[in-house]
Image: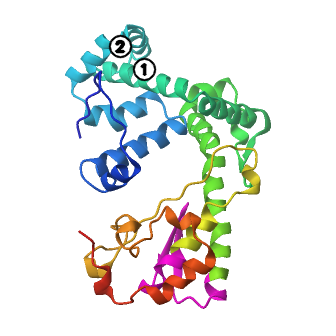
Amino acid sequence: MSIKISKRTETRKITVEEFIRQKNVQPYKSMRQVAKSLNFLLIFGGSAGVFSESALETSWTIDQVNNFIEENNCQAELEAARAKYARSDYDDNKIKYIAVATRMRNNFFKGYPGLMERIDREKKFAAQHGYVRSPFGATRKTIELMLRGDYDNKHLSGVLRNLENITANTAIQNDEASVARRAMVDIQKWLEDHNMKSRMFNEIHDSIDFYIYYNEIVPVLWIAKKTLEAEQPEFSSSPVKLVVDCEVSSLPAGQYYKGGVDPDVYLPEGVTWESLTDMTEEEALSWIDKTTSTPADFARKE
């Protein structure tokens, strides 16, 4: 994938509908996945070197890198990278990629200053106490960071950097998993209380997988969205709301597990993934009788 960043004098806001349509269309689908990966890398404090290897070196030509350095006056980053890697076997092109990645990474954290503050706070706490803890109570011990000395800094720098990265992402990853597992209990109870034939069958980190009968698609997606996006007591002081993505795979349409599409494709006419938020339980359950249960009725809408 090739990405070119350029200055524009005209912009146009796209609608939510346009964005949703583009999510599963190439090249936007691939670009979206790359962007998600890079965002996670930066959110968890990934280094400029890793950012360069993960994105720039696989996407940008050296001409694009040179243009970026010139247009954005990255000489300071370039000289710093040359000094840092003077004794390495990196050629000058590799160092230029790192210089550009450094500028992009710095700009990212300037735009979201709270992210780096969080990372620094977690690392400092781990160094002082030998552990980090999520709001849900899960604890990850990092005693090596608290007891590190000159020998460790010199001979075990890679191990210590890995532990620091662990401190940066432990709380977030545990928060996601804890929310998902709490929701699983509540969703399963709801499915049983309402005699649903649909079932959960798998969970990985912050993802929950279901087998859904066609006529139960509305109430099952409704309870999943309602439960997973509910306010969590542990996050009561946070202004950031939980938002859940959903993907539906239909075997009759040739879509296998993990190869599905936007849920709106298979939801009945008049119902969308977003509109489920405003639906009552009674309204969601009423769709069991309204929704046909034959696979042919759920062939992909063109």
> Is residue 39 left or right of 223 when viewed as pictured?
left
Q: Helix or strand or loop: what does disc 1 sit on? A: helix
Q: Quadrant of residue 67?
A: top left
Q: Is residue 234 left or right of residue 28?
A: right
Residue that label 2 marks: 72
Magenta residue check for 209: yes
- How many numbered marks does the figure carry? 2
Which one is nearer the viewer's eye here, 230 or 95?
Answer: 230
At 42% from the left and 13% from the top, the residue drawn is: 77
Residue 220 left/right relative to 53: right
Nearest the viewer among 246 and 45 is 246
Question: Range of the magenta residues?
Answer: 191-220
Residue named by callout 1: 103
Q: Residues within 10 Å of mark 1 (few under 14, many from 20)?
A: some
Counting from the top left corner in percent of width and height, residue 245 is at 48, 59
Q: Label 2 sits on what residue type?
A: Asn
Give the distance between the C-alpha atoms of the residues marked 1 and 2, in whole angstroms. 9 Å
